[in-house]
Image (cartoon, grey):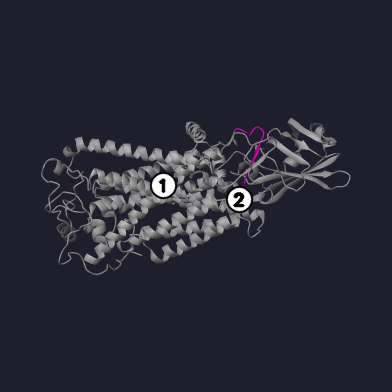
Amino acid sequence: MQLFHLLFVLPLVSAVNFIAADSLIQCGSNDKFSVSKFSVLFTPDNTTLAVGIVGHTAIHGKVDLQVDLIVYGYKALTQHLDPCKSKDLQGFCPMSPGDLKLESAKIPIPKDVMSKIPNIAFTVPDLDARVRINVNDQQTGDNIACVETQLSNSKTVYQVGVSWTVAIITGLGLFMSAVYSMLGHSQTATHVAFSSLSFLTFMQAQAMVGMSAVHMPPIVQAWTQNFQWSMGIIHLGILQRLCTWFQRATGGTPTTLLSDLSHTSVIVQKRSLTSLLLPRADDSSNGQQVTVRGIERVGFNLKIEPSNIFMTSYFFYYFVVVVILIVTMLVKLAWKFLGPRMNARLSLTAGWSTLTRGTLFRLMFVGYTQMCVLFLWELTHHDSGAEMALAISMWLLTSLALGWTTFKIFQRARRSLDMHNSAAYTLYSDPACLNNWGFLYIYYRATAYYFLVPMLAYTVVKGMVIAFAQSAPVAQTAVILVIEAVMLVTVSVMRPYMDKGMNIYGIAAAAINFLNAVFLLIFSNVFHQPGLMTGIMGVIFFVYNAIFAIVLLFWILLGLYHAVRLKEPDSRYQVLGDDRNSFIRTNQPMTTEMDALGKSARGDLRFQSLGDDDWSPMREKGHLGPSNPYAMGGGRSQTDVVDLSVPLVPSTEYARRPGMI
């Protein structure tokens, strides 16, 4: 965990302290002063303020400038300046209508003013501070214009190293779960996969917070940027060029927000700018102010054009799918040549075609969250007709595939209940069902297999709210709060997961998501709370989410450590109350009478074939044929299970075992 901590801390150490700003917006209704380009740099070491302004003014006469420094909603400093008394501001004395251009003016800051600037302005990451400048008429004292700029000290909790670290650990966990599944350690594989997928789900939830349209403190924006890769939003130069080319080739018009920064001020929507923001404009003429919020804000912070966000996610998802399928094919080839010579324990519980289908279904499930957000958002963004067609077709196909999978699971579970009074029998004894669709129900109790429906519905509804309510931040956060509250109550009451540890995580994750929704509602300023309160709550948001992320990382690493260290890693986990292990095919010796009974029911003690579309070393050697009527799946539909006149499994519903909640 020290490494994870250092990834955050080391980049925050800077040799030179400074505060900078690069955009200026109007904070009043008066349009006598407009700015198209603004930059300011303050370095306390040489006590100078470098300012550059390009704009237009309709003000005539002598003015006074009132400069206010606001840190976390608290007015920390107020300074009055008379341009006529400063040689660096001679262009403002007197002011006359026309173009305004000030090239890198350097203004000395008195020591008494320096002493009033709080130290946190230079040390706290993602500083929530801004400077407001009021232009007042010297004769009447009336306010003529008001402009405001957001400050930055270059220190941030968004670190590329953190993103890479959590991505590698998550991928390692998923890879190791596949390895231990092939080794026959079903309990270990299930728990390692659950912890890895849980962390991935947490990261996607954090990314969705950053994609919400609500204006939020800078530290919240920066924290959520660490996890946008889990939604397929990454910055690669070649990928951005490919996205731009595709859009132009399909009749779309790429945005030029990033290339127009030389004469356009981009306002990244934050919590303090509620009444100041301008509507989004589609062109980038001189003097324009452009506001980005929600998903566009995420893309801008990663230097991705708004018109490239969807295709970036789309190409990233397909790249991951292709890479994993190539790896699967390479493993298949290696297995075909090396498998028969390896230890008999290293054998598959399903054929390669089944494993490939199962891999595709898993990839659909993992990517479904980003599809429900970004693919549906594309329908409102209209980058090009072809991109909209790709978005809706991909989302529909994935939704239909997962819906069909859910139907097949319910069909088999109901049949198993009718024949054997236990849903676990068919769901865990049929290798095709387990390897194709087990990822949807294996983490739940056998009696709570149906919980996959609320989880899929939760993903779809929440994704739609994020995608379609980008223009209504308050309504968006209110609906998200209701969704998270319903999910928290549902998980707390049903406790559907397979053991106590998983249920504790499920409830904790739902509670974190609900708390995040509460914070989002507060950030929307619907309660009109003081700015200082909003800033402090932004820091609190970062702290408790970072702690939860570290706990999840420790959980994954601990599971991997025990899996590698223990000779029999499954012995670390308690026996489950639904006796699913009695029905799962395993290559390990039978250690209990229930294992032997389950194997007898499946025919494993006599036959080792898996199905007519599956490959196994025994079949390739001619020991078994695909037409063997006694092999599961051989010569008959995979939906058939062993039809016993007297069930060989308990005929009553399994009660919860001690230690389960």
Residues in magenta? Answer: 259-269
In the rendered image, the residue lying farthest to the right is: 139
Q: Type of residue at label 1? A: Gly
Task: Write down the residue under mark 1.
Answer: 367
Q: Position of residue 197 (x, y in %)?
A: 38, 50
Residue 59 within the segment the image draws in magenta: no
Secondary structure beneath disc 2? loop
Secondary structure beneath disc 1? helix
Relative to 660, is 270 on the left or the right? right
Res 308 visible: yes
Q: Residue 563 got which mark?
A: none
Quadrant of the frame with the C terminus: bottom left
Q: Position of residue 189 (x, y in %)?
A: 30, 50
The one of 472 and 282 positioned closer to us in this rendering: 282
Res 576 visible: no
Distance from disc 1 to disc 2, alpha carbons, whole Å, reads 27 Å
Instruction: Give the residue at x 65% y 53%.
Output: 532
Badge 2: few (under 14), some or many (20 or more) residues near its Cα, within 10 Å?
A: many
Q: Main secondary structure of the magenta part?
A: loop
**Lower position in the chain sequence, tag 1 or tag 2:** 2
Q: Residue 215 got which mark?
A: 2
Quadrant of the frame with the N terminus: top left
Relative to 95, is 411 on the left or the right? left
Mark 1–mark 2 contact, CB under 8 Å? no
Instruction: Give the residue at x 35% y 45%.
Output: 173
Which is closer to the viewer, label 1 or label 2? Answer: 1
